[in-house]
Image (cartoon, grey):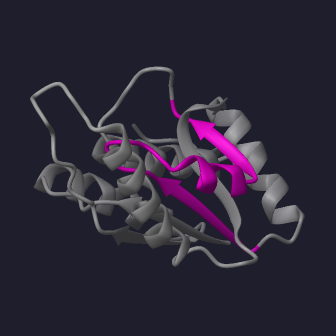
Amino acid sequence: MEIKIVAVGKLKERYWAEAASEYRKRLRPYAHVSIIEVKDRPLAKRSTSEIDPAQAGLVLKQEAQDLEKEIGQRDYLVCLTPEGKMYSSEELAEFLRWLESSGQSTLTMVIGGTLGIDPGLKAKAELLLSLSRMTFPHQLSRVMLLEQLYRAFKILRHEPYHR
């Protein structure tokens, strides 16, 4: 199985990059995992608490266009979003089993930027997935997603998970 994680922005802090790299390495026996980063669009603020809604909408549309360039027509598209469905680790494993058995070869998982994901792109997704009802930085979300994918493959193979 091929898994593409398409994310807005780069992992700037070394510790996030190292954690992501470690989980990608652990995933190698189970799936080909690629991480594609698209440009994080700047958002000018009128003050420290105000965001211009029109500008926010434009940024979301621009990011969505960049993200869509990385999504294949036959990819199974999952967008990570707070309003998405929450899976347990075991349910995520069963979802991966279902994808493999249905002949789906490429799973593309999208992580948005600070503003989230454009509604138009979310509407194209086969699944909206939430890691939690809590809010996390998108850098941490990427690491958490990789860890959960690794855990799911370990569950599917009935292998022990070393913490």
Residue at the (42%, 21%) spot, across then down? 134
Residue at the (60%, 66%) spot, across then down? 30
Q: Is residue 157 visible?
A: no
Q: Nearer the viewer, residue 44 or 73?
A: 44
Q: Quadrant of residue 86?
A: top right
Image position, residue 26 (x, y; %) = 43, 61
Q: Return the residue found at the far right.
A: 102
Image position, residue 130 (x, y; %) = 57, 34
Q: Is residue 147 above or below residue 28?
A: above
Apparent side of residue 91 relative to residue 159 in the rendered image (left or right): right
Q: Is residue 96 above or below residue 75?
A: above
Q: Is residue 155 above or below residue 101?
A: above
Apparent side of residue 84 relative to residue 73 in the rendered image (left or right): left
Magenta stretch bounds = 105-131
Q: For residue 127: magenta?
A: yes
Residue at the (35%, 55%) spot, across then down? 59
Q: Which of the image's four quarters has the C terminus? A: top left
Q: Which of the image's four quarters has the N terminus? A: bottom right
- Count the marks: 0
Image position, residue 48 (x, y; %) = 10, 28
Q: Quadrant of residue 21?
A: bottom left
Q: Nearer the viewer, residue 19 or 60?
A: 60
